[in-house]
Image (cartoon, rainbow, N blue to C red):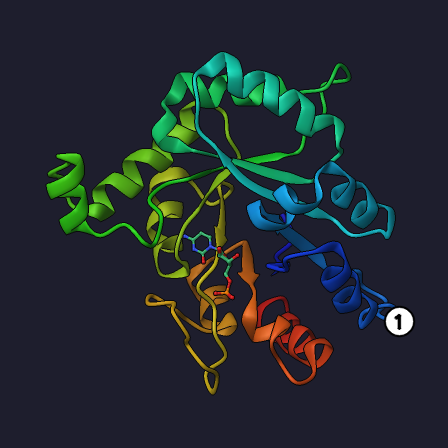
Amino acid sequence: MQRDVIIACDFKSAGDTFRFLDLFRNEARKPFLKIGMELFYAEGPGIVRAIKGQGHKVFLDLKLHDIPNTVKKAMAVLSRLDVDMCNVHAAGTIEMMKAAREGLTRADGTRPLLIAVTQLTSTSEERMREELLIDAPINDTIVHYARNARIAGLDGVVCSPLEAGMVHGACGADFLTVTPGVRFADGDVADQVRVTTPARAREIGSDFIVVGRPITAADDPVAAYRRCLSEFVG
Ligand code: C5P
């Protein structure tokens, strides 16, 4: 799988999104984009079709987590939207992840990439223990959930770039790691805690880095995107 940079389009409306994308109109390489809950719930499926219509690949980051039958049917709808990547919570169980994969698979056998969220970066070991009664170390749960995702036939997981090597070690080099929490060495960390640079993410073995504010809030977003590409993809 070719390494790539995915820009997190964390905008509140289609207008803001297309104003941003217009900056990239002369780029030979159309950026791979992530659409999250805020934009999808604000604008509906039309925003996905419009962005796909401009030639971008789309990672639809809706993190499904429900009973297997509901997830299967919802995934069939997302598959018809022709997204390139979508995701579920691994906490939904192997059965739910299998159902998601079945729902995504089109009649011709093709499907978007399907990845699982292991532990959100906002979850701490202390909260897991006290609120969720999960006593295992957080890294053990991340590796265990990644293995479950592999057993369910998923393509990879979302994790911190710092965890990418550990996940590849447990699940194989071909199991994808999609990693947010990326910052330039001279950049602002903002609210992210476990961050690393695009170059270091490449060394550790990330397959896709998901980059939001270092590109979207840059003075020159196109230059920031190109810098990510040259550090991460080479
Ligand atoms: O602006 P920034 O580069 O921090 O954006 C990172 C993107 O990745 C955001 O869309 C954020 O919601 C998402 N994300 C994350 N950590 C996770 C899962 C998703 O930062 N564990």
Q: Quick one: label 1, few (<14), some, or many (20+) residues within 10 Å?
A: few
Residue 78 lies, with reference to residue 54, above or below; the image says above
Q: Quadrant of the C terminus?
A: bottom right
- Residue 35 in sight in this render: yes
Identified at 55% across, 71% down, the residue is 213
Residue at horizontal 37 percent and vertical 37 percent from the top = 146
Number of labels in the image equals 1
Q: Is residue 166 left or right of residue 124?
A: right
- Mark 1 Cβ inside 8 Å of ligand 1: no
Residue 225: x, y in percent? 67, 73
Residue at the image point whose x is 47% and y is 45% from the top: 173
Placement of 76 over or under 146, stated as above or below: above
Residue at numbered disc 1? 26
Residue 5 visible in the current orientation: no
The foreground one among 59 and 65 is 65
The part of the image, by quadrant, that contains residue 152 is top left
Pinpoint residue 153: horizontal percent, then vertical percent. Answer: 49, 25
145, 166: nearer the viewer: 145
- Could you say where residue 125 lies in the image, as x and y percent from the top left? 17, 50
The amino acid at mark 1 is Asn
Vertical relation: 90 (above or below) 69 = below
Secondary structure found at label 1: loop
x 44%, y 23%: residue: 66
Q: Is residue 29 above or below residue 133?
A: below
Residue 124 location (% of width, % of height): 22, 52
